[in-house]
Amino acid sequence: MLKPLALPAVALIAALLLPGTADALTSPIQSVPALTDNSLYRSGKIKSSECPDGALSIESAPAAKRTITALWRCLNTSWSAHFKHAKLPFTPAKLVVLTEPAPFCGKEWKQGFLSTYCAGTKTAAVLVNDEYYLRTREIYHFTYITALYGAHLQHTTGIARGFGALPYKNKAENFERERRWMLQGSCLSGVFLGSVWKTAGEGSEGWPALLDLVKSNGDYRSKKDRYFAKGKNIVYWLDRGFKSGDPGSCNTWKASSARVA
C-alpha cells in the first residue's frame, strides 16, 4: 500500500563538517583536487546488478527494517565491487536501524532526525518508528537511504575532508557549499539506483513519480532553509546519476552556482 505524500525532515549528515573561515569561496570550486578531480570521477560506470529484496515496504516497522537492511546490503555489494574494479580502497558501511531515538556516534539523537552517518565508525543509523512509515511514501525511501550511503562514499574518497576545509566568508557561501555536498549525494544515489532499478524498482510507482516527489520535497524545503537545493536541481542531479550510471557525472563542485541553487 502506498502512503500519502509527506515531507519528512530527513537529516543525512550530522556533526561531520568543519567550518572554514579563510579566503572567500570561489564558485565553481577551483584548485581543490579532493573535490574537483577526485579519483571517484575516473572510476567508470557502475555495473548493473539485481536487488529484488530492496523494494521497500513501510507497512510496519519490522517490514521497513527488513527492506532497508536488504537495500543497504545491495549498496555495499554494488559499491564494493565497483571500487574493487577501479582499484580504489573501500570499506563497506555498517547500518544500525533504530526503533526509537537513542545515542549514536557519542551524541544524543537530535529531535526531528530520521538518519545520520558516523564517519568515525563508518556506520549509518536510520530511525524506523510510527512517524517513519506512516508519514512517508514507499518510493521516497529509495533516494533517502541511498543518498545516506552517498555520505559514506564521500568520506571514503576524501571528498569530505576537502569539503570540511573549504573556506567561506558568509552564510550564503556556506549554504552553497553545503548544497554542492548534498546534491552530490543525490547524484551518487541516482548512479546506484539506475544500476538496480529493474529489480529494486519493480512494482513501485516508477522513476518519473519518484522525480516528481523529490522535486516537490525540494521545493518545500528550499523555501524554508537554503541548506536545501531547489527541487529542479535535486531532480537534475539525481536523474543525471541515474541515466549516466557514472560517478564521474556527479562532480557538483565544478557546476555553476545556478545549477546548485
Image (cartoon, grey):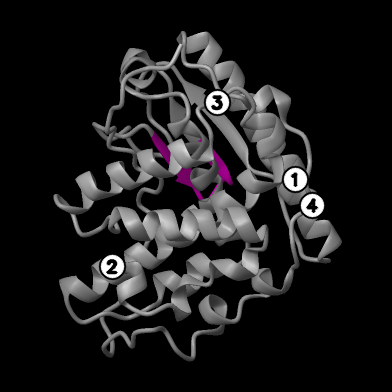
**Pointers 1 and 4 in contact (CB under 8 A)?**
yes
Cβ atoms at labels 2 and 4 below 8 Å apart: no
Q: Residues within 10 Å of mark 4 (few under 14, many from 20)?
A: some
User: Of the residues under marks 3 and 1, which one precedes in the sequence?
Assistant: 1
User: In front of the other: label 1 or label 2?
Assistant: 2
Residues packed near mark 3 inside 10 Å, few (<14), some (14 to 19) or many (20 plus)? some
Mark nearer the N terminus (1 vs 2): 1
**Nearer mark to the viewer, of 3 and 2:** 3
Amino acid type of the residue tagged 2 in the rendering: Ala
Reading the image, the residue beneath label 2 is 261
Residue type highlighted by circle 4: Lys
Q: What residue did someone put label 4 on?
A: 47
Judging by the rendered image, the residue that carries numbered circle 1 is 78
Q: Is residue 116 magenta?
A: yes
Classify mark 3: helix, strand or loop: loop
| Image-quadrant location for residue 256 | bottom left
14 or 2, which lies in front?
A: 2
What are the residue bounds of the magenta stretch?
Answer: 115-124
| Marks 1 and 4, how far apart at CA | 8 Å
Q: Amino acid at mark 1?
A: Ser
Q: Could you give the CA–CA distance between mark 1 and mark 2, rounded to whole angstroms?
A: 31 Å
